[in-house]
Amino acid sequence: MSITATDLVDLAGPVGKLVHRRRLINATVMQSFGIDPVTGDVFVLQVAEGQLTLPGDSGPVDGSVRADRGDLAVTRLSPAGAITGSMYLRGFGHGVQMGVEHRAGVSRLWTETAARPTGAENDGYGTAVTHFAFSDGTVLDHGSPKHATPYTPAAGATSVTCTIDPTTNRLIVRFSSGGMKYEMYDLDRAAAGVWQPLARISQPSPNGVFQGYASLGNVLYMLAGQAIAPDNPANRPPGNTYLTAVDWSTGAVLQQQLVTAGQGLVYREPEGMAVSVRGGVPHLHFGFACENPGPRTCTVLSLSQAPGTDGVKVLTDWQTIRLASGVTADVATPRARLISLAGTTTLQLSGGVKGNFSADTVIGTLPDALVPSIVVRGSVPRNNSDGRCVARVEADTDRNLRLYGGQSTNPITWAQLDSFSATWH
């Protein structure tokens, strides 16, 4: 298998965003995520939280028992980050990795199953993989006829998980059997119960605590690292998160990169990877569990294979800013986009706003893909009054776009955003 230009993502390249600090149905740490290739819905796995009583339970179950059993919670997020559904999986595993396919109009999730307690904490990890239709509001038990017959890649295999490469329609299975290994399968044949490996490689060092993987063409990607937290020796920025690219043909490491993106995220524990294709362009995504103390949230960052032109690479194209109450568009509707300019990720605004801004105020809300992890600010022209003709605009980590400088004695009546261009983190 030869590596193409679209297979090998520049791990040191500019980073965009897909999901920003979104709450999930449980307060526990996200473990992994997958993206429906048709709807764009994001599915997130967590170990189910303690004290839940699910259908079939005799009463509330402690969180440590849930972890030992391998009970998982699934949250479905819309492409905009809103919770649109959830379900629970009992006896499935730890949720280390997952895949999503869209078959016959339905989102089908591929996950580990047949959990067996392993490791120092005795948490349940999968010993096989399966797939099933996402069904909002339901509980699915291991052994139910509602999931496909589980597959184990080798007798006695442990830590069995899977993911999907939507660019090649291949299923990737990771498992431990005399060392950690990866196998590649044709997704359609595997879904039909025909399991014939197309390739197998042993896992090289991920340079840290393993946290997830994805496959794009003939390159395997791994994520490793720990939370920036008091119990982590690397508990200060830039952290110890690494991405690694591996050649499917030889198992050799092609690139390994320290990830410094998302420095403003609190806790910032790397969790899960996925590949998606948006507008014909492959994207490599990796996640961070955030907030400390919880409830935890989910953030997903992205590396885009979009081509650049004259040193400019569009990471997120123009998106409309949802204006706050009492704010209207002036001449052109306010929009924002994310670009890489000579290697620097930059947030650009366009359009204008008008109103009666007599104090610092929120003028709009940014979509998740454009929300920074550290506050971004810039100066913009405003109505000239008493010699004041410049205002400050800030894009904040809470998704709000704020306008500063208005006073009761000197209100801002309009502000143009076209000159706003600031470094985004």
Image: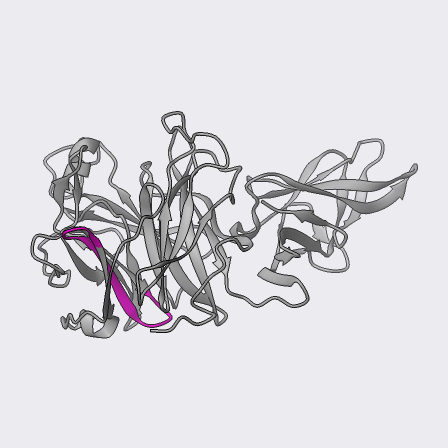
Depth check: 163 or 359 in front?
163
The residue under the point 32% across, 46% down is: 211
Q: Position of residue 11 (x, y in %)?
A: 48, 55
- Kindly indicate the quadrant of the structure image that contains residue 409: top right
- Residue 99 visible in rendering: yes
Counting from the top left corner in percent of width and height, residue 97 is at 28, 52
Instruction: Out of 376 and 15, give the one closest to the viewer.
Output: 15
Q: Position of residue 108 (x, y in %)?
A: 26, 63
Specify the farthest residue to the right. 386
Residue furthest toward the top? 230
- For the point 47% across and 34% down, the residue is 266
Is residue 119 in the magenta section? no
The quarter of the displayed image where residue 55 is located: top left
Tell me, yes or no, if residue 41 can be seen here: no
Give the magenta part as a residue range: 165-180
User: Does residue 347 sit above or below 30 in this rendering?
Assistant: below
Against 55, is 316 above or below? Answer: below
Relative to 258, 107 lies left or right? left
- The quadrant of the image that shows the N terminus is bottom left
Q: Is 412 left or right of 100, judged from the image as shown?
A: right
- Tell me if residue 218 comes above or below residue 73 in the rendering: below
